[in-house]
Image (cartoon, rainbow, N blue to C red):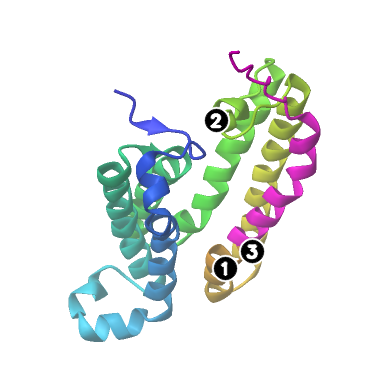
């Protein structure tokens, strides 16, 4: 049975619980933000957390737990694991564990760089071999011609690499607080704005569905 499906293909359950789907997608990020913001307060309330490390590492541990909970609930309620949160979750577990084990925040800060680079390179390499891989993800939502899929895949591939570079610039040149705020409150608006900017291309290359003839 297929367990990982398209982020765009809405199941019956997703249509019935759209707010739950949204909460599961942004919930772990909000937990991460809260853990970093109130790290010292959490240690005062739960002294055992001090063994994890500073506020950012405590936030990382909470982020890992919230990510697992989110994926489990998604599987139970929606009967599938969304591709991008699933891949991101794997990287979170690996790099989060390394950050806590080595007491080095660098690993969790590089997680968005690794994930976005992975998606970007995969899409662009697919194009080099004549495959518009984005079509396999979005084909349930859009029916585009071959040129449209190639253009959209190219744009998303470049955009993912842009996000990777942007993450590197922010975490290497600004404070932890700025990076956390960018990760939670900056990346999503940028992605939404980019997605909306692709609508003219999608409209130009959409394949019209043939009219269904009614029986006389």
First reached walking from the N terminus: tag 3 or tag 1: 3
Element assignment for label 1: helix
Extent of the magenta region: 187-216
Q: Is residue 48 above or below residue 135?
A: below
Quarter of the C terminus within the rendering: top right
Residue 24 location (% of width, % of height): 38, 56
The label nearer to you, 3 versus 1, is 1
Residue closest to the eye, 127 or 55: 127
Pointer 2: what residue? Answer: 140
Pointer 3: what residue? Answer: 170
The label nearer to you, 2 versus 3, is 2
Which quadrant of the structure image shows residue 170? bottom right
Element assignment for label 3: helix
Pointer 1: what residue? Answer: 185
First reached walking from the N terminus: tag 2 or tag 1: 2
Query: Per the image, is 188 magenta?
Result: yes
Residue 192 location (% of width, % of height): 64, 55
What residue is shown at x 75% (from left), y 28% (from top)? Answer: 148
Graded by Cα atoms within 10 Å as few (under 14), some (14 to 19) or many (20 or more), the crowding at tag 3 reads some
Q: CA distance from mark 2 to mark 1?
A: 29 Å
Question: Quick check: can you spot residue 104?
Answer: no
């Amino acid at each position: 049975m297929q367990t990982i499906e398209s982020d765009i293909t809405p199941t019956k359950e997703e249509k019935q619980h759209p707010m739950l789907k949204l909460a599961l997608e942004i919930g772990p990020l909000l937990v991460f933000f809260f853990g970093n913001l109130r790290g010292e307060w959490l240690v005062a309330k739960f002294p055992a957390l001090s063994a994890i490390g500073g506020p950012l590492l405590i936030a990382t541990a909470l982020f890992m737990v919230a990510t697992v909970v989110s994926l489990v609930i998604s599987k139970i309620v929606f009967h599938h694991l969304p591709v991008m949160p699933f891949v991101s979750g794997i990287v979170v577990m690996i790099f989060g564990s390394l950050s806590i084990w080595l007491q080095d925040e660098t690993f969790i800060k590089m997680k968005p760089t690794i994930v976005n680079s992975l998606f970007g390179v995969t899409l662009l390499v697919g194009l080099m071999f004549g495959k518009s891989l984005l079509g396999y993800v979005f084909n349930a939502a859009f029916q585009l011609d071959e040129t449209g899929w190639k253009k959209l895949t190219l744009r998303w591939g470049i955009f993912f690499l842009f996000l990777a570079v942007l993450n590197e610039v922010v975490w290497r040149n600004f404070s932890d607080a700025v990076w956390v705020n960018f990760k939670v409150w900056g990346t999503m608006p940028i992605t939404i704005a980019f997605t909306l900017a692709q609508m003219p291309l999608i409209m130009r290359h959409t394949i019209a569905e043939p009219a269904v003839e009614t029986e006389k």
